[in-house]
Image (cartoon, rainbow, N blue to C red):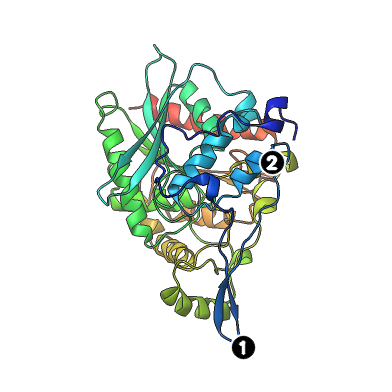
Amino acid sequence: MELSVPFRFRSPNLLLSPFTHTPTNHPFKHQTPFSTKVTIKPKIRTLTVRAQRKEPIEGVSDELNAVARFNLDFAYTRRRVRSAFAEVQLQLDHCLFKNAPAGIRTEEWYEKNSRGLEIFCKSWMPKPGIPIKASVCFCHGYGDTCTFFFEGIARRIAASGYGVFAMDYPGFGLSDGLHGYIPNFDDLVDDVIEHYTKIKARPGLRDLPRFILGQSMGGAVSLKIHLKEPNNWDGMILVAPMCKIADDVLPSDAVMKVLTVVSKVMPKAKLFPNQDLAELAFKEPSKRKLAVYNVICYNDNPRLRTGMELLRATKEIESKVNKVSGPLLILHGADDKVTDPLVSQFLYEKASSEDKTLKLYEGGYHCILEGEPDDIIYAVHDDIVSWLDFRCSIK
């Protein structure tokens, strides 16, 4: 990965961003980079915490690599790291960054929700003078945020005349909460509903169609939202939705029994079995290498409660797919080994929606929005925009 010369030495963005709220008793210059992993020694039955050093990121300075190794458990740290890497990310050799439409109006802000959590929010609007056709509200995946690859995806959708809105869930990206921790999936869904209810009520948007776009775990979030408020959306776009965890990445039944018990005692421990999904998620090797630059995504072993909540949510969705009733577009890579395309087929067949479309991309992996060859990425984006355009034209 070749970067411009300045990034080989020093990033100009090492100062805190205007969004960063750093407690005065947590100066970064004294912070030891580490991530915690709990290991159980069966003979003496004690718990130890050991430092885990990340592999250096190619093409960036030692200073930036040191920042990337900060403990990301806390939102203020994640905000610092994102700020330091913001310009580096824009220099990456990816079509989403190199060919991003110009003139898109963006806004970032934080707002405190009803549970007292500070939520990071972002919007992308068409060029001035272009009328907005509808609002598109995004729900990101488990190992993702709304500030990296989605930046380029959102710009492409916005350039087609849509207002695009996104948020980081509590515990993910730049929002408050312990990194990667979902104590209750229903609470997370309610947080998303609360935020997007405010978005849809804005004066310039309240009379326009509104759509929800969910990727991977965000597909599960979107489906849960639809099941809770089926009449509040004009359509749903699901990209490789997590309706059921693929058998290939599930723990065995014996391990699941142990995890169920241990998760009640140590819910935040990073002990849920996991495998490196990068090779399964990104088909294009050059794009797979860029995933490491999404420096604030959660890429450690799932926390025990999080893993159990994801399984619980998918089982509930699987049992209620016949209640999915709104206009529905399902897009899935046919060779996805993370979320099973057969489950998308099941969702398509069982959903009671009269307007429903399933499109499988031959040879596609999990991340069809950003991890395929450029022409496939553009084709997926065009399919989304075409579907939106048609639904807006008949309103």
- Please tell me whether mark 1 sits on a helix, a strand or a loop: loop
Q: Which residue is found at the position 27% from the left and 40% from the top?
A: 197
Q: Which residue is found at the position 40% from the left and 64% from the top?
A: 316
Is 158 or 79 nearer to us in this picture? 79
Amino acid on which disc 1 is placed? Lys
Q: Which mark is residue 62?
A: 2
Q: Tell me the residue that label 1 is attached to.
A: 43
Q: CA distance from mark 1 to mark 2?
A: 40 Å
Q: x%, y% of residue 108?
A: 40, 31
Is 160 or 324 nearer to us in this picture? 160
Q: Which residue is found at the position 52% from the left and 80% from the top?
A: 258
Q: Quadrant of the C terminus?
A: top left
* Residue 381 versus residue 112 in the image, above or below: above
Q: 10 Å neighbourhood of mark 1: few (<14), some, or many (≥20)?
A: few
Amino acid on which disc 2 is placed? Asp
Q: x%, y% of residue 392?
A: 38, 27
Q: Quadrant of the N terminus?
A: top right
